[in-house]
Image: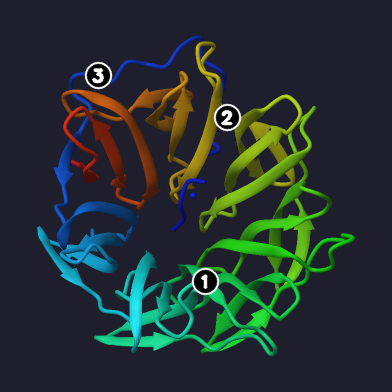
Amino acid sequence: MSRILRIGALGLVALTAIAAAPAELPYTIVELGHLGGNYTQPLAINDRRQVVGVSAAADGASHPFLWQNGVMTDLGLLPDGISAAAEDINYVGDVVGAGTTESFPYQPRAVLWRRGQVIPLPLLAGGTGSQAFAINDWGLIAGVADDGQANQATVWLRGTPIPLEGLPSPFGPNGWATDVNNLGQVVGYAYVGSPSTRAVLWRQGRPVDLGTLPGDDFSAAHAINDRGQIVGISGNLGASTERAFLWENGVMRALPTPPDATYSQAADINVFGVATGVVGTPRPQAVLFSRGQVVRLPSLPGTVLSIPNDMNNLGDVVGYISTDAGSPGVVWLRRP
């Protein structure tokens, strides 16, 4: 339910190289097309293989879309809307994201798309903007909202915005919630200094600082599955390093990074502990982290780079591939 920048526990160990994708790797690449413009960015996929994201319309404006069974549908904008992006979709088909309007062109507003309706989510008291990044199957929404002074990690429970407690910081409570699982556990990051952040797990609204990998000074959590496994990035600002991590049972550890890679990022993790993300050599390459291996996802002819944004429990992955001919939004559909 998350994006890169949105891996599992199965005893992952460091490899000496990225495993080449075997010929029988069970994926079919499906290009999604556009809403009349020239780009599409898929951001989430549920277990019914419904895909949501953002695509350019014929007038060049960014519109939210739903893709299902090969058909792309415009989800619609807010009244007076000028753009929007759909960030996540749950199993029942509720979609969340954010949109802008003519009245507030530079201030996004969190949005829920439900049964054909475009519903702006309430703001925090004193606030003017918000964004929704994730929704679980029970309808709990996670994101960020401002209170007139700072951005706060926020959940919407039955439509009511609730700010989440931050970590101790000279900036006060300041953070973002990036994902929520079906147990109501929320992850994201909070600012603890300038410009340092810490990956955070919120349990019943209370924050847990997940720390960093050894030698690092910042971290951010991107996703959590229903087993409580969390993935994200940990890095060192001074050294310009960034590594994918897995946090489980109170312990953070680095995910495998091939020796020829200059960085790694974890985007999402499914309930089976299989994850997707990128390794950079230095261009980002979409990979799976599974059973102690880092395996490249298949690519298209002329691929320059590939980036995954989300995956489901079937093993499907969504993202985009930049090629010599363009940058299509794609679904890596896992074959039986």
The alpha-carbon separation of the residues under discs 1 and 2 comes to 29 Å
Q: Is residue 291 above or below residue 317?
A: above
In the picture, measured across the screen, residue 45 lies left or right of residue 278, that is left
Q: Identify residue for label 2.
A: 255
Q: Which mark is residue 263?
A: none
Q: Nearer the viewer, mark 3 or mark 1?
A: 1
Quadrant of the frame with the C terminus: top left
Q: Earlier in the sequence, mark 2 or mark 3?
A: 3
Taking depth in this image into account, of 8 and 317 the one nearest to the observer is 317
Q: Residues within 10 Å of mark 1 (few under 14, many from 20)?
A: many
Q: Secondary structure at mark 2?
A: loop
Taking depth in this image into account, of 59 and 7 the one nearest to the observer is 59
In the picture, measured across the screen, residue 74 lies left or right of residue 205, that is left
In the picture, measured across the screen, residue 60 lies left or right of residue 31, that is right
Residue 287 horizontal/vertical position (percent):
39, 30
Q: Identify residue for label 3.
A: 22
Q: Residue at x 65, y 43 (%)?
A: 247
Q: Is residue 52 visible?
A: no
The part of the image, by quadrant, that contains residue 306 is top left
Residue 57 horizontal/vertical position (percent):
20, 65
Give the residue type that dot 3 points to: Pro
Q: Earlier in the sequence, mark 3 or mark 1?
A: 3
Q: Is residue 158 above or below residue 324?
A: below
